[in-house]
Image: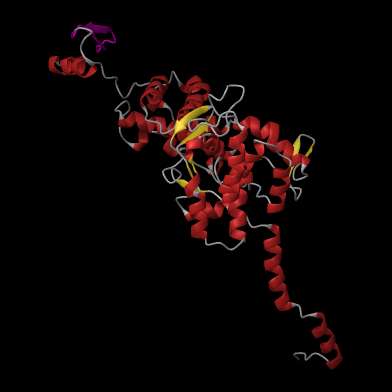
Amino acid sequence: MFVWTNDLGKERSKVVGDAAMTTEERWAEVGRRGLDKLAYRPDPTRTTVAELSARYLHDHPFNKQSTRELHEQIMHSLIVPKWGNRVAIDIRPRELKAWFLAFDIATGTRAKYRAVMSGMYSFGQQEELLPLGEQFNPCNYVKGREFSQVSSYEALALEPEDALKILAQLRQPEYEIALLVATCGLRISEALGLKWRDVLWERSLIAIRQTFVHLNLQEGAKTKLSRSRVEAPQLLLEVLKAWRQETMYAGDDDFVFPSMKLRGSQPRSASMLVEDYLRPAAVRAGVLREVGGKTYGPDGEEVRRFGFHVLGRHSLATFLMDEGHNPAVIQAIMRHSKLDMTLYYSHSQRRQKRAALDKVAAQFVPKRATRELERELGSPRVQ
């Protein structure tokens, strides 16, 4: 049965065949009868934000489930409650900007909200739910430094000895997870998504075939370049082999780091690993200090975020850069599409800054023996 809504907004239907017909045959029959031309098409000048949001969330081809969930959260909790009953093209940029600015949030978060709403409008125009033209997307005119995506926050990058102290505080299998992230630069979602078949022992490689994000297993990786095979140090492989002999889930299709509570049916939770093991290990090691509800790093700076991304990607990129390795090689290890991103992940360490400045100072400050000789002979002066 083909069901449609006529131009009066009333539902109508016609039988097009029996239950034995395939989906393709049913739609072919709908086309042959011209029933699809009877379907009601909404007036683009009267589409409400609620209607637009529903179509966007239902039909937009999101690349990742986590992205879909983020957009659903923003739509359902923020955009639709405020604007749902309004005609989309009647919303003015000034009132939209005032609404965004009323949120006491970081500028990057505000920019994300605007981007989601703007994407919804663009989708509506592509689907002919809204009139064409940039003037019909009020988000195009909501601008200003309050929507900057540039953050002044600089993530912590650990010195190698600090990373070693943290690793020393961990036990199996949390140690293996942290070591994998620290030595290969894997995202924690990639590490938790690994199955034993993904460890290519003879070739010293790890294949990234799936990730574990927001408690959901997703095929593929974050980006096309990330769907590659990662070089694995031999020492790491030996540690993983020892763990495989200990775990009760050692089959090729078993997760390398399974949830024991769920009997290996899915990997462990990244957030629980950080809160229950990684962060306490960093505190015990003296790398982090917790005072008055705030967390401070080795140099006394406040640390707002600390997790496997700090231990792995930020610290690894910085260490490799400080060791003088070819930036192109570091970019390949990090699996970044652009070198700019690699440079963003590498932070100048204090010891490297000091060493560089010591070399400069040596050019201006003579050695002690030279200064004493100059005093005895009398330094020439410019008159």
Q: Which residues are magenta?
A: 1-17
Q: Residue 187: name its quadrant.
A: top right
Residue closest to the eye, 382 or 316: 316
Residue closest to the eye, 331 or 261: 261
The x, y position of residue 36, in whole percent, is: 20, 17
Evaluate whether residue 74 shows in this view: yes
Q: Residue furthest bottom?
A: 377
Question: What residue is rendered at 57% in x and 45% in y?
Answer: 237
Vertical order, 97 against 382 (above or below): above
The x, y position of residue 137, in whole percent, is: 39, 33
Q: Residue furthest left?
A: 32
The colour mode here is secondary structure
Vertical order, 32 against 375 (above or below): above
Let me know if residue 262 is in the magenta part: no
Q: Residue furthest right?
A: 376
Question: What residue is rendered at 46% in x and 44% in y?
Answer: 226
The x, y position of residue 199, in whole percent, is: 50, 41
The x, y position of residue 35, in whole percent, is: 18, 14
Residue closest to the eye, 198 or 309: 198
Evaluate whether residue 307 shows in this view: no
Residue 197 falls left or right of residue 383: left
Vertical order, 42 against 172 (above or below): above
Question: What residue is rendered at 71% in x and 61% in y?
Answer: 351
Question: What residue is rendered at 60% in x and 31% in y?
Answer: 247
- Quarter of the image where the N terminus is located: top left
- Quarter of the image where the C terminus is located: bottom right
